[in-house]
Image (cartoon, rainbow, N blue to C red):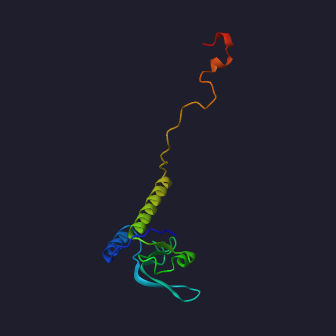
């Protein structure tokens, strides 16, 4: 469960929804109730709900809850929901997910990942010049 608390207004939620759809996500249901399947008890009314994941059939259901004290976030996590408590945390998650997906697509097209430069310093305890290893002690500099 991801928790970052910072309450935002309805304009931020509308801007987030517009940005999510622009990034390829499904349009979320706004102000929807989520009921516990075992008891039927309403766990909370959510500002945004992507019941089928960010894209239909991909990933876990996603919930945006701007008032974390009002809902049962622990139970939502048990039921498999990805719970976000701020617009910024959900926005950041979607952007990171898209960047990771773009990186895996590049690797599939044959572009290798950038590798760090190879270190060239010698390992500890080894002589830098092999000739010194076999020279008699009297002739070493």
- State the residue lying farthest toward the bottom: 40
- In x, y percent, where is residue 11? 30, 75
| Image: 109 above or below 58 | above
- State the residue lying farthest toward the left: 11
Left or right, 54 with respect to 9, comes to right
The quadrant of the picture occupied by the C terminus is: top right
Q: Residue at x 47, y 46 (%)?
A: 114
- In x, y percent, where is residue 138? 67, 10
| Image: 35 above or below 61 | below
Q: Residue at x 43, y 84 (%)?
A: 32
Residue 86 picture quarter: bottom left
- In x, y percent, where is residue 112? 49, 48
Left or right, 105 with respect to 132, comes to left
- In x, y percent, where is residue 96? 44, 61
Residue closer to the observer: 77 or 69: 69
Residue closer to the observer: 33 or 70: 70
Q: Residue at x 49, y 50 (%)?
A: 110
- State the residue lying farthest toward the top: 138
Residue 12 picture quarter: bottom left
Count of picture labels? 0
Residue closer to the observer: 58 or 65: 65
């Amino acid at each position: 469960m991801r928790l970052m608390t910072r309450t935002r207004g309805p304009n931020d939620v509308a801007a987030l929804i517009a940005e999510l759809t622009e990034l390829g996500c499904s349009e979320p249901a706004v102000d929807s109730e989520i009921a516990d399947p075992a008891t039927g008890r309403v766990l909370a009314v959510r500002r945004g709900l992507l019941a089928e994941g960010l894209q239909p059939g991909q990933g876990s259901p996603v919930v945006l809850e701007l008032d974390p004290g009002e809902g049962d976030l622990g139970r939502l996590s048990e039921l498999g929901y990805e719970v976000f408590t701020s617009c910024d945390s959900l926005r950041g998650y979607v952007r990171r997910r898209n960047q990771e997906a773009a990186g895996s697509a590049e690797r599939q097209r044959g572009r290798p990942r950038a590798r760090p430069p190879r270190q060239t310093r010698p390992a500890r305890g080894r002589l830098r010049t092999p000739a010194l290893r076999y020279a008699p002690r009297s002739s070493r500099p």
